[in-house]
Amino acid sequence: MTAYPLPTPRRYLALWFPFLPAERRERAATEAGVWPADAPLVLTDSVKGARRLAAVSRKALKLGLSPGLTLADARAAVPHLLALDHDPAADAALIDRVLDDCLRWTPLVALDPPHGLMLDITGCAHLFGGETATRERVLHRLRGGRFTVRGSIAGTPDAARALARFGRVALVAPGGEAQAVRPLPITALELSDETTTALRRAGFKRIADLADRPSAPLTGRFGTELTTRLTRLLGREDRRITPSRPLPACVVEQAFAEPIGHADAIARVLRALIERACAHLEERGEGGRAFEASFLRVDGVVRHIIARTGRPVRDADTVTRLFRERIEALADPLDPGYGFDLVRLALSVTEPLESLQPDLDGKAIEADEVADLIDRLTARFGAVRVLRFVAADTHDPVRVARLVPATSQMPDQGGGRAIASASWMRPEPGEPPPRPLRLFEPPQAVEAVAEVPDGPPIRFRWRGALHDVARAEGPERLLTEWWRGHDRPARDYYRIEDGQGRRFWLFREGFYGGDASPRWYLHGLFA
């Protein structure tokens, strides 16, 4: 009998910042030297025409103030409080910065609102001395930023969240979630106020009061949401998390006991990481399309620099050159501050890459050099400034081509963000091209003499010169797509050749015999 290893149980670290909005304002005011040390802080928001407390500081909470109170009631209870406007956008920006800093512990980090983070530390904790040591290191680093933070580790995100916000258990052994959450109040289910009130009136005070009950009667009386949340809280269902950043295909990193800040040292570390990543890619027979270097500062600030390529590459010199171009082109220079204590290189998009086999005419080498030039220009000037044309699925000559970033992917290249494209119109063998390469925008008006009602022009005058038509083909009637509305009348296009062999693309707008005389325009020139 073959013995298969059991899957590694998932482990989650839930972090909660109970006073994040107030502590953010307190920290900013203290750094500016304008904070009255003895004033409890409350943050207010307008709710149905009344100012209510949206968040409070630790000191305000100890004085009996809590979110939801009106500002008038709060001032009556604590006259000397300091009230400021609540700024959820600034709080969200701060928690995003904290999330970036937590990527040093695991690549799977998700927002856990309000004011929380969820870290999937499965398979990562041993790198930092075990789960207990990992939790202590994370909390110590975050508390160093003068934030109150609580954290719990459990086998499901719901159990970890409930223990961090409503309990005092730091770590739950695998499979022990049901026992660990039993003492928690029923508010840990985070149901609606109406459901919570109904549960209390029915005599349920703790999770233990619900855990031993059959699920069918609870579902019939309080709805499926109660039993679903209870099942997850007891660790019987793991809903996993959706990380804020997709899991990269390859990650290499270097941590430092002493932070680095010199440009040469940073360049050497980045080069070493690129070489390691390219070696991994070569072993897998792949190349990278998107390389992201993350520089994590000791003060929690994280800087991300992305280098993209138009084709998969794994040459260390090429990738290093792209990052050099990107760093030199930064409008906001890479500031090490007090130094970087971790540098990470992640490959978010990889593709199969075979060894380059040059054709007999050497065009494969030339194509590779052109692609390398495009990558360097993109790294220097940005993707929105280095563009290429792709065909659009339309018969409208004005909209038949569109510009996209030169490094964007086509649908058949796999991975990353693909750009949908139609095929270019190709002429039949021995036939002239159906569309000219050069179009006038807007089309230029001409004077033309033509047979009615649908005959081609016999002669036309353009820019003062008279052209006698020797050959003509058409008409080709083009209408605007129906979903765009009737923004212009129908056009009858003709391919024209004059007596001197010059070829033109003319169209007639309107019809003879209508309310208004038709008008002729020159839309393009054939080579």
Image: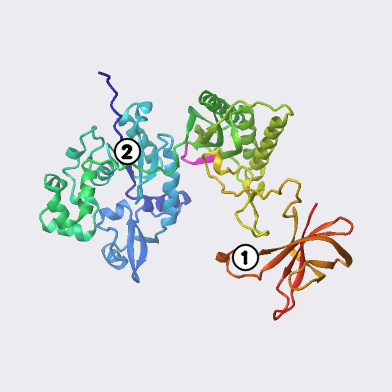
Mark 2 neighbour density, 10 Å: few (under 14) some (14–19) many (20 or more): many
Disc 2 and disc 1: Cα gap in Å? 57 Å
Residue 127 pos. (x, y %): 38, 27
Q: Image quadrant of residue 470?
A: bottom right
Residue 59 pos. (x, y %): 30, 52
Tell me if I can see residue 149 in this picture.
Answer: no
Mark 1 neighbour density, 10 Å: few (under 14) some (14–19) many (20 or more): some
278 w.r.t. 393: above or below: above
**Secondary element type, mark 2:** strand
Label 2 amino acid? Leu
Q: Is residue 304 magenta?
A: yes
Write the start and end of the magenta stretch as one range: 298-305
Is 131 in front, or is 177? 177
Q: Is residue 297 left or right of residue 521?
A: left
Is 77 in front, or is 406? 406
**Secondary element type, mark 1:** loop
Is 116 in front, or is 50? 116
Q: Image quadrant of residue 132?
A: top left
Q: Is residue 470 left or right of residue 86?
A: right
Q: Is residue 34 left or right of residue 260?
A: left
Q: Which residue is mark 1?
A: 480
